[in-house]
Image: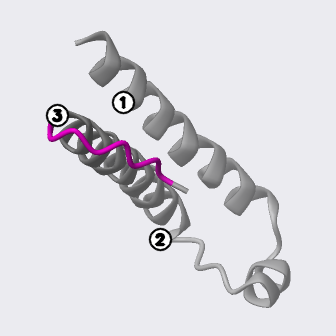
Amino acid sequence: MLKKFYRAMVVARAGSAAAHVALNMTDKQLADAGIDRRTFPLDAMTRMEAEFAEKDAQKATAHSAKTVGLDIQAA
């Protein structure tokens, strides 16, 4: 439960930081960086959630490999 709370806080902070960045950049700066002001915070939150999901998948793969007797380490 604490893990879910922590992750929710991290995802929310990533969205908040992205919104702050988007608000403080000019339209030209955003265009040069290829960032859409409306979707940037949501994209940042989605990327953070994907990173957490990838980390969970790696951990599950490593755990299942150890249960079968294989010692596989993720790169």
Q: Is residue 70 magenta?
A: yes
Q: Residue at x 36, y 42 (%)?
A: 71
Residues under numbered marks 1 and 3 in contact, where contact means CB atoms less than 8 Å apart: no
> Which residue has dot 1 on it?
8
Quarter the N terminus occupies: top left
Q: Secondary structure at mark 3?
A: helix
Q: Splitting the image into 4 quarters, where does residue 31 fall?
A: bottom right
Q: Position of residue 73 (x, y in %)?
A: 46, 47
* Start-end of magenta stretch: 68-74
Q: Residue at x 63, y 53 (%)?
A: 18
> Which residue has dot 3 on it?
67
Residues under numbered marks 2 and 3 in contact, where contact means CB atoms less than 8 Å apart: no
Q: Position of residue 56 (x, y in %)?
A: 31, 42
Main SS type for the magenta part?
loop
Distance in Å between CA atoms under marks 1 and 3: 30 Å
Indicate whether 41 appears above or below 31.
above
Closest to the camera, between mark 1 and mark 2, is: 1
> Which residue has dot 2 on it?
39
Q: Is residue 59 magenta?
A: no
Distance in Å between CA atoms under marks 1 and 2: 19 Å
Q: Secondary structure at mark 1?
A: helix
Could you classify mark 3 by the number of other residues whose Cα lies within 10 Å: few (under 14), some (14-19), or many (20 or more)? Answer: few
Q: Identify the amino acid type marked 1.
A: Ala
Q: Identify the amino acid type marked 3.
A: Thr
